[in-house]
Image (spheres, grey):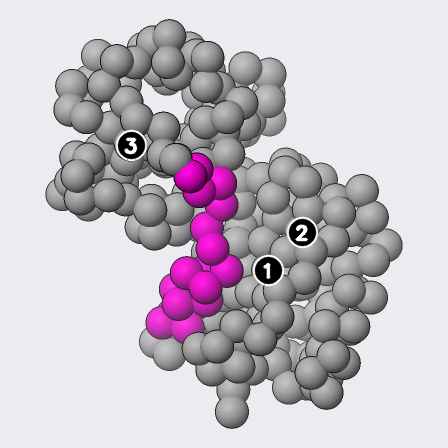
Amino acid sequence: MNYSLIVQSTYNEIQIALFQDDTLLESVNESKKTASKNILLTLDALLKNHNLTINSIEYIGVNQGPAPFTTLRVLITTINGIAFAEKIPLIGLNGLEAMLAEHSNPHFPITLCLYNAFSSDAYFGIKSADDTMETGWNNIDELLQRIKKEFGQPMLAIGSGCTFFQDDITKTLDNITIANPLPQFPSMEFLHSLAQKLFTQGQTEEQVTPLYLKKAI
């Protein structure tokens, strides 16, 4: 039996999932307000609940973001420390690309994923029917105007930013459908499937870094 961990940061919490082979054993959440002091305790309790230790873990898959800077940095710094101390391989995962891969719908030629990048900016990912992907960040008004100009086909919108930017979206774009129910982040199961594939291919890292699409000014 092989055990692995998948971790990711959202806008409200960190999530840690324990897998046995392809089976999700348990997933736990820790508020971003207490993550810095409780993440190790939360992880330890999760492992003990299944009579495991950190040495039982074959690899750790990490959603590298985008996500709020502080919470994402706390999570990745902690996981890098654990991996270094215990010599556990890491798998870095792009959260935007994972969302587009998991939630694209064949009925929509274009899929748009949005996250709040603060100060009226958005992290975005765009996937076309030919599987072409673009990711980055931009002012939300400029981004939506560009999309209106360049993409005339029906579009599906996903990601937690759709809630935050809903008024801007509906005001600017006529050919877009916000998914309902709205997937806000990649599922732990899908992240695990990506990480498992990369681990099998030997694409591991000794440490991972946050995905900072938005550069400091």
In percent of width and height, residue 95 lies at: 46, 47
Part of the protein shown in magenta: 181-198
Give the residue furthest to the top: 171
- Foreground of the two, 50 or 124: 50
From the viewer's perspective, is residue 216 above or below residue 14? above
Residue at 44 percent across and 42 percent down: it is: 183
On the image, numbered disc 3 is attached to which residue?
A: 156
Circle nearer the N terminus (1, 3): 1
Q: Are marks 1 and 3 in contact (CB under 8 Å)?
A: no
Relative to residue 136, is residue 132 drawn left or right? left
Taking the magenta stretch, the answer to whether it contains residue 100 is no
On the image, numbered disc 1 is attached to which residue?
A: 7
Q: Looking at the rendering, in which quadrant would you find the C terminus?
A: top right
Relative to residue 179, is residue 76 drawn left or right? right
Type of amino acid at the residue the image marks with label 1: Val
Residue 51, quarter of the rendered image: bottom right
In percent of width and height, residue 192 lies at: 46, 67
Residue at 78 percent across and 51 percent down: it is: 35
The disc placed on residue 194 is none
Taking the magenta stretch, the answer to whether it contains residue 196 is yes
Mark 3 residue crowding within 10 angstroms, few (<14) / some (14–19) / many (20+): many
Residue 128, quarter of the rendered image: top left
Rounded to the nearest angstrom, the CA distance separating label 3 from label 2 is 27 Å
Mark 1 residue crowding within 10 angstroms, few (<14) / some (14–19) / many (20+): many
Numbered marks: total: 3
- Foreground of the two, 146 or 28: 28
Mark 1 falls on what kind of element?
Answer: strand
Q: Main secondary structure of the magenta part?
A: helix
Type of amino acid at the residue the image marks with label 3: Leu
Rounded to the nearest angstrom, the CA distance separating label 1 from label 3 is 26 Å
On the image, numbered disc 2 is attached to which residue?
A: 14
Residue at 34 percent across and 52 percent down: it is: 102
